[in-house]
Image (tube, helix red, strand yellow):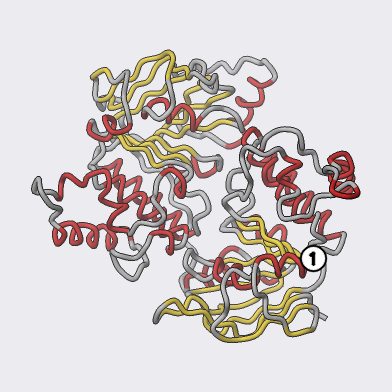
Amino acid sequence: MPLLEVKNLDKKFGPFYALKHVSLTIEPGEVHALVGENGAGKSTLIKIVTGVYKPDGGAIEWQGRPVIISSPKHARELGINVIHQERQLVPSLTGLENVYLGLPYLQFPFGLGVRWKAMRERAEKLKRELGMDVPLDRPAQDLSPPERTLLEILRAMMMDCRLLFLDEPTAALTDKETEMLFRLIGRLKSQGTSIIYVSHRLDEVLRLSDRITVLRNGTLAGTLPREQADRETLVRLMTNQEARAPERKGDRERHGAPVVLRARGVATADGKVKNAGLEVRKGEIVGLFGLAGAGRTELLEAIYGVRQKTAGDVWLEGQPATHLTPKQAIRRGMVLVPEDRRSHALVMGMTIRENMTLPVLSRFSNGVTIRGKRERAAVSDWMAAMKVKATGTEQTVGELSGGNQQKVVFAKALMSGPVVLLCDEPTQAVDVMTREDIHRLLRTQAEKGCGVVFVSSDLQEVLEIADRIVVMHEGETIAELPNEGLTTEKVLKICYDHRKGGKTGHAAGR
């Protein structure tokens, strides 16, 4: 008997179908991958099965019986849990307090207090059974990305979870952290928990899953056993197009080009960056790579003026830019595409138009009012250029898929006409085709003379797009490498040799 069976599910938003006649079965103890382009309907399906949305048609059976999942609470009571791409933790609460969110606290008789010791023993016992290593005493805000993921899985399993949705669980993880998560998935599977694994990383999907369901434009494109699937087949089902070989970095000779960004000896007040720097020439793409905790994001934020800088100097187009604020950075031609688009790049309750023109609103003003027609025309042009799938300029950005939100972020950044583009994990949790679109966009900007800094946890992706690579370790830049004959093994050896206290033999970009 299937654990979950979805039959001919429909969901409409206005006149548009987000899902149309979608059917799916999940077997007990199965890892079932769910893939598709951004906007294919994956999130809508998750929200229906977890009680966030009500379907407009079709039926759901749980353990062979028809069920109407009325709320997320009802879903959890059935044994259905989801680990969202955006972590659902209270930052100021400890790990233990987060684990018990939504669960009844154990109480002494007559309500004479909370039995924290018994609650901790229960959580620690489950941790041991699952082979987890996550601290329960520290606040969630002090945990690393993999620790937060493990904490959410621990909370889910405290609720007698039978079906666990994992939505882009490795988006912010290093390779080593990803391997740890995969071992945990194998353990959950061996204990009979079914997992629906949602990811744009097709190599992970092909490695982990027993079966793979592909959605395309809200419809079911097919369900395949893993043995019958490969990357080319999945891309064809997702897009109705043949898979293309990854584009390699262009042959950009920029040694004599003027330097558009130079940072030297940068340190931050929180100690995340200690002695770091980089140099970017006009028309060049510089990759910034490092293992977890290297300080890549923090360096970009310090250069851009988001994070307090206690030492170091920054120059833009040869002119000092030591005490920049983000507003001043934009005016001087430097824009940051941040890692967390939902919290730091977009106002989710505002429209596409309002988000896109926010940094350059004065451009559409006559001093008294906003020239609405001109503003909407400019936004429409950018939506077309970026291939944003939406009902129009006035659709709320929070209603868009992750990939389309990221396209809005890029359009917003490019509307200011930057000479330096800082990109922090710009392809995180976007589909294969959107990732290729973003790569082409960055190459095009470089060809137009823009200097690009590209941060990614995916080293292979960095090697595909960057002209040079700057390597960071624990807040310092430790190597600067021309991307000629480089391999992942060579770059990782530098990282791990430095971690062991070895000498890399490469000049640091300071």
Q: In which quarter of the image is the C terminus?
A: top left
Seen in the picture, residue 396 relative to 67 is either above or below; the reply is above
Seen in the picture, residue 14 relative to 81 is either above or below; the reply is below
According to the picture, the residue beneath numbered tag 1 turns out to be 162
The number of discs equals 1
Q: Where is residue 322 in the image (x, y as percent from the top left)?
A: 32, 18
> Is 278 positioned to the left or the right of 84 in the image?
left
> Is 139 positioned to the left or the right of 250 in the image?
right
The secondary element bearing badge 1 is classed as: loop
Of the residues shown, which amino acid type is indicated by label 1? Answer: Arg
Which residue: 40% across, 16% down?
264
Q: Position of residue 213 (x, y in %)?
A: 63, 72
Seen in the picture, residue 327 relative to 347 is either above or below; the reply is above
Q: In front: 484, or 96?
A: 96
Whether residue 13 is visible? yes
Whether residue 209 is visible? no
Q: Position of residue 227 (x, y in %)?
A: 72, 69
Q: In front: 32, or 231?
A: 32
Extreme residue in the front direction: 110
Q: Where is residue 257 in the image (x, y as percent from the top left)?
A: 26, 27
Which residue: 45% across, 60% down?
433
Q: In which quarter of the image is the N terminus?
A: bottom right
Which residue: 13% across, 56% down?
371
Which residue: 40% across, 30% down?
306
Other residues around mark 1 within 10 Å, as few (<14) / some (14–19) / many (≥20): many
